[in-house]
């Protein structure tokens, strides 16, 4: 006859039973004595300082060891790239979008019509 509805219920029962045994200890007089609760750690100024110093060191090393082409783009980088692209490419207004939804642009440098995604 099945005692538990599922394996997770069976595991939970065993876990609770084990923790109950750890919390209650019998001494020589057979009295139940509760274990002392764990000390709760408090935040200290030295701990905060250590965390700040550690973060600064890690970020500094990461900045030094990461090559410029692998660094993340900033908002300014994206704006400059957009200005470069839309300075070189002029929109073509008398032609519709292609089958992939890209808009036509005239490439000033090559003299060709190219299709780009434009938001």
Image (cartoon, rainbow, N blue to C red):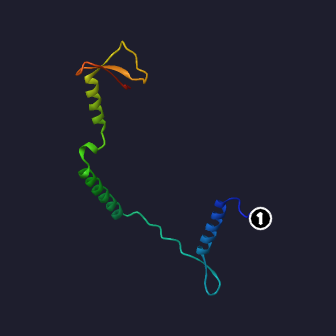
Q: What's the residue at 64%, 70% (across, down)?
A: 17
Residue 81 falls left or right of residue 2:
left
Q: What's the residue at 35%, 62% (across, down)?
A: 45
Label 1 packing within 10 angstroms: few (<14), some (14-19), many (20+): few
Residue 112 falls left or right of residue 38:
left
| Percent x, y of residue 81 | 28, 31
Question: Quadrant where the N terminus lies?
Answer: bottom right
Q: Quadrant of residue 16?
A: bottom right
Query: In terms of secondary structure, where does tag 1 sit?
Result: loop
Front residue of 93/78: it is 93
Q: What's the residue at 63%, 64% (across, down)?
A: 11
Front residue of 106/5: it is 106
Q: Quadrant of residue 10?
A: bottom right
Residue 80 falls left or right of residue 11:
left
Residue at numbered disc 1: 1
Q: Quadrant of residue 119?
A: top left
| Percent x, y of residue 104 | 35, 19
**Residue placed furthest toward the top:** 94
**Residue placed furthest toward the bottom:** 28
Q: What's the residue at 61%, 71% (across, down)?
A: 18
Front residue of 31/92: it is 92
Total marks drawn?
A: 1
């Amino acid at each position: 006859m099945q005692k538990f509805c599922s394996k997770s219920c069976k595991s939970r029962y065993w876990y609770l039973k084990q923790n109950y045994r750890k919390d209650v200890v019998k001494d020589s007089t057979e009295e139940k004595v509760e274990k002392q609760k764990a000390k709760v750690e408090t935040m200290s100024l030295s701990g905060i300082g250590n965390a700040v110093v550690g973060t600064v060191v890690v970020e500094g090393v990461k900045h030094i060891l990461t090559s410029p082409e692998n660094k993340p783009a900033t908002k300014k980088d994206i704006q400059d790239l957009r200005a470069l692209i839309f300075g070189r490419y002029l929109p073509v207004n008398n032609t519709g979008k292609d089958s992939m939804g890209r808009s036509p642009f005239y490439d000033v440098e090559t003299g060709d019509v190219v299709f780009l995604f434009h938001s």
